[in-house]
Amino acid sequence: VDNQVFVATPSPARDTSAGYQAWGHSSVVSPWGKLVATTEHAPAIVYADVDLAETTKIRAQIPVGFQKRDDLYEVKWRS
């Protein structure tokens, strides 16, 4: 939500015989944190319609890019 972007969260399908137990449930989440699309434990493909205009609307409602406080800190690049 803080980054105000759509997020795709891929996950391996669950394999109970593997050493690592993946959760599955690959998903796409909106900038508001709303679940747009998801899968279950089995192998699958996530399909989702992503409306980039929604991102623009959300960024106007919560203008985190304009709330930067340069008077409190300074970013310096190290080489």
Image (cartoon, rainbow, N blue to C red):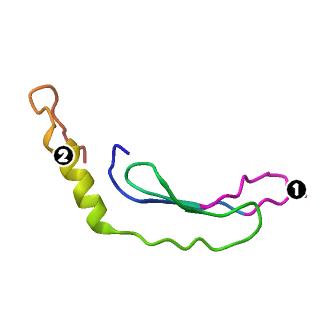
Query: In this view of the protein, which residue sits in the foreground, 60 or 13?
Result: 60
For residue 74, above or below residue 41: above
Above or below residue 11? Residue 70 is: above
Rendered image: mark on residue 16 = 1
Kind of residue at disc 2: Gly
Extent of the magenta region: 13-26
Q: Residue, x 40% and y 59% (percent of image)?
A: 6
Q: Of helix, strand and loop, which one carries label 2? A: helix
Q: Dividing the picture into quarters, in which one does residue 15 lie? A: bottom right
Q: Please tell me whether the stretch drawn in magenta is mainly helix, strand or loop.
A: loop
Identified at 21% across, 46% down, the residue is 61
Extreme-top residue of the structure:
72
User: Furthest residue to the right?
Assistant: 17
Q: For mark 2, what is the residue?
A: 65
Residue 75 relative to residue 47: left or right: left
**Label 1 sits on what residue type?**
Thr
| Residue 46's disc number | none
The span from disc 2 to disc 1 (Cα, nearest Å) is 44 Å
Sequence order check: which comes first, mark 2 or mark 1? 1
Residue under the image location 55 percent in, 74 percent down: 47
**Quadrant position of the N terminus in the picture:** top left
